[in-house]
């Protein structure tokens, strides 16, 4: 829930700041700034809640903690890449792939009632998927329209 609030809040603030400073709206740029901010927050969570996020992976996956750290670093790189002209589209495409690839871990966590912040097995359970799956699709669409299929605008324009 926090990620959605961050995404929409930063998007709106970015639009207001652009209107004040540039006298026009740049929706795709505001979308990338918002997604980058959200990714920074989720990346930090990979380091703070590493144990709980490691529990989101099935037992057969080795090096869970290291994999969670790696995905945190990837999210940091994606946050930067979305804002750089040269990397905007490729970052967007890779981020869409990333969002698709992490969906099974969210399903696994929900089915096993994992609370990633507490690193316990008393989380929301399968009902969480009614929120998480549509939100994941929303993130994919957000990245697609703001980074892949958009009129290119950039932080330095």
Image (cartoon, rainbow, N blue to C red):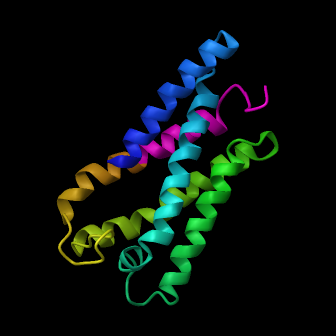
Start-end of magenta stretch? 137-157
46 drawn magenta? no
Identify which residue, 33 or 130, lies in the foreground: 33
Asked whether, in this view, residue 28 is left or right of residue 152, the answer is left
- Residue 50 image offset from top left, x and y in percent: 44, 75
Q: Is residue 25 visible?
A: no
Q: Quadrant of the C terminus?
A: top right
Asked whether, in this view, residue 94 is left or right of residue 124, the answer is right
* Residue located 51% across and 38% down the image: 142
Location of residue 30 by image quarter: top right
Asked whether, in this view, residue 106 is left or right of residue 69, the answer is left
- Residue 32 image offset from top left, x and y in percent: 61, 37
* Residue located 50% across and 46% down the image: 140
* Residue located 30% across and 71% down the image: 109
- Residue 107 image offset from top left, x and y in percent: 32, 66
* Residue located 55% across and 45% down the image: 37
Identify which residue, 4 or 143, lies in the foreground: 4
139 drawn magenta? yes
In this view, 153 is above or below 92: above
Q: Is residue 153 visible?
A: yes
In this view, 47 is above or below 144: below
In this view, 86 is above or below 12: below
């Amino acid at each position: 829930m926090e990620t959605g609030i961050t995404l929409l809040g930063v998007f709106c603030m970015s639009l207001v700041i652009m209107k004040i400073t540039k006298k026009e709206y740049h929706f795709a740029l505001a979308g990338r700034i918002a997604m980058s901010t959200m990714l920074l927050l989720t990346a930090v969570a990979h380091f703070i809640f590493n144990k709980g996020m490691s529990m989101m992976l099935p037992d057969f996956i080795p090096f869970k903690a290291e994999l969670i750290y790696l995905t945190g670093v990837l999210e940091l790189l994606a946050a930067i890449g979305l804002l750089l002209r040269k990397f905007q589209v490729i970052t967007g495409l890779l981020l869409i792939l990333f969002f698709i690839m992490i969906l099974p871990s969210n399903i696994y966590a929900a089915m096993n009632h994992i609370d990633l912040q507490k690193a316990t097995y008393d989380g929301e359970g399968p009902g969480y998927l009614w929120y998480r799956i549509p939100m994941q699709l929303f993130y994919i669409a957000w990245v697609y329209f703001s980074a892949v299929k958009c009129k290119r605008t950039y932080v330095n324009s």
